[in-house]
Image (cartoon, helix red, strand yellow):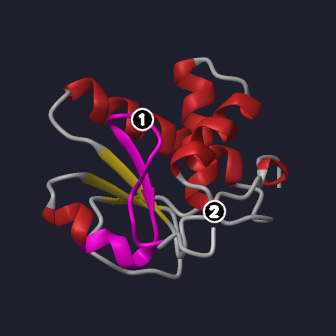
Amino acid sequence: LDTFDPATIGWVSEVIGITARDGVQGALDDGHFVINVADEIINEANVKIAVEPGSGQVLDCLNGISQVIHEVLEQGDKKVVVHCAMGMERSVLAVVWYLNQFEGLSIDDAYDLVRAGRPIALDRRDWILS
């Protein structure tokens, strides 16, 4: 963990990755569809849907992000990279929710899969209803 660079794209599958703010430009340069889930970050991401714990809107935001991921992947020509500040909490939760809603994984299995590609991932499932 001490050597993991948050700017690295942690690939959760062949087509879904997670990165930090510092990895966004590289993801865009590589032609990936980038989703920004951090309200405080302004960048060139393709879409911004902020996940704000405690806002009462987390579940709606996660559903919206999952739908965007699903639609982009259905088109089949781009990989999706989701980012927040460090790629540890909000982006991880968004990808976990997508895996649960569209790939049928349990939340536990989704977190295990995410951690395999992104070892700094933290479990924030308690935010879903916050």
Against 66, residue 54 (above or below) is: below
Against 125, residue 35 (above or below) is: below
Indicate left or right for 21 with 127 as reference: left
The amino acid type of the residue labelled 2 equals Ile
Indicate left or right for 85 with 14 as reference: right
Q: Secondary structure at mark 1?
A: loop
Q: Residues within 10 Å of mark 2 (few under 14, many from 20)?
A: many
Q: Is 102 or 130 nearer to us in this picture?
A: 102
**Residue 76, horizontal then vertical, whole percent:** 20, 27
Q: Which mark is residue 120?
A: 2
Q: Farthest residue in the front direction?
A: 3
**Residue 130, horizontal then vertical, whole percent:** 83, 55
**Residue 75, horizontal then vertical, whole percent:** 20, 27
**Residue 48, horizontal then vertical, whole percent:** 41, 62
Q: Residue at x 77, y 57 (%)?
A: 56
Q: Residue at x 38, y 81 (%)?
A: 42
Residue 13 in sight from this viewpoint: yes
Q: Residue at x 62, y 47 (%)?
A: 115
Residue 61 in sight from this viewpoint: no
Q: Secondary structure at mark 2?
A: loop
The amino acid type of the residue labelled 1 equals Ser
Q: Which residues are magenta?
A: 6-25
Q: Write down the residue under mark 1.
A: 13
Image quadrant for the N terminus? bottom right
Q: Is 34 or 23 nearer to us in this picture?
A: 23
Q: Is 130 or 27 nearer to us in this picture?
A: 27
Number of marks in the image?
Answer: 2
- Disc 1 to disc 2, C-alpha distance: 16 Å
The image quarter containing residue 95 is top right
- Closer to the chain start, of discs 1 and 2, is 1
Q: Which mark is residue 60?
A: none
